[in-house]
Amino acid sequence: MFRHYWQADAPTDTPQQIFNHLLDDQGEIVTQADSAPLSDSRRDTTAWDDTDEIMLGREFTLSLPPDLAPGEYQLVSGLYDRQTWQRLIAPDGADRLVIARIRVQARSP
């Protein structure tokens, strides 16, 4: 389980959804969770107009597939337009942010 903290430079033109993907070493999605960034869906990203405010995001849980191989994985997140699926692009040109690198190990018997 994890959650994001948000601080916006400016509101977006359209409401954005957040994606959270766990990627394997080939960049393929092994599990994901998408939703509105905040628990209060009435407060979408078009209303994020206070640059001093830090907002507590909703909780996310990623369910790992039972046959997931041990190894290194990346948790990445980003925002996208709910209507067009167009991802929000950061000033550096990236359409996602690496949140964490995760090592999955086999269970001991």
Image (cartoon, grey):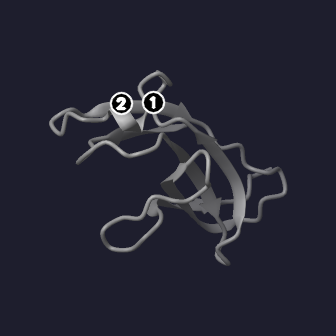
Q: Is residue 87 visible?
A: yes
Q: What's the residue at 33%, 40% (across, down)?
A: 6
Whole-percent x, y for residue 49 in the image: 24, 35
In this rendering, the answer to whether 93 lies above or below 20 is below
Marks 1/2 in contact by CB < 8 Å: the verdict is: yes
**Secondary-structure class at tag 2:** strand
* N-term-proximal mark, 1 vs 2: 1
Which residue occupies 46% across, 43% down? 14
- Residue 74's disc is none
Quadrant of residue 105 in the image?
A: bottom right
Instruction: Determine whether 59 is above or below 14 in the image.
Output: above
Is residue 104 rendered to the left or right of residue 95?
A: right
Q: What residue is at 52 percent from the left and 59 percent from the top?
A: 87
> Disc 2 designates what residue?
56
**Residue 69 in picture, x, y percent from top left:** 76, 65
Q: In this image, 76 relative to 66: left or right?
A: left
Q: Secondary structure at mark 1?
A: loop
Q: Would you name the residue on which mark 1 appears?
A: 38
Disc 1/disc 2 C-alpha distance (Å): 7 Å
Q: Amino acid at mark 2?
A: Leu
Q: Amino acid at mark 1?
A: Leu
Q: Nearer the viewer, residue 55 or 8?
A: 8
Picture coordinates of residue 31 (x, y %)?
71, 53
**Vertical position of residue 12 compared to residue 99: above or below:** above
Query: Toward the viewer: 40 or 28?
Result: 40
Q: Outermost residue toward the bottom?
A: 26
Residue reaching furthest left?
Answer: 52
Look at the image and tell me whether residue 104 can be seen: no
**Marks 1, 2: nearer the viewer:** 1
- The foreground one among 84 and 43 is 84
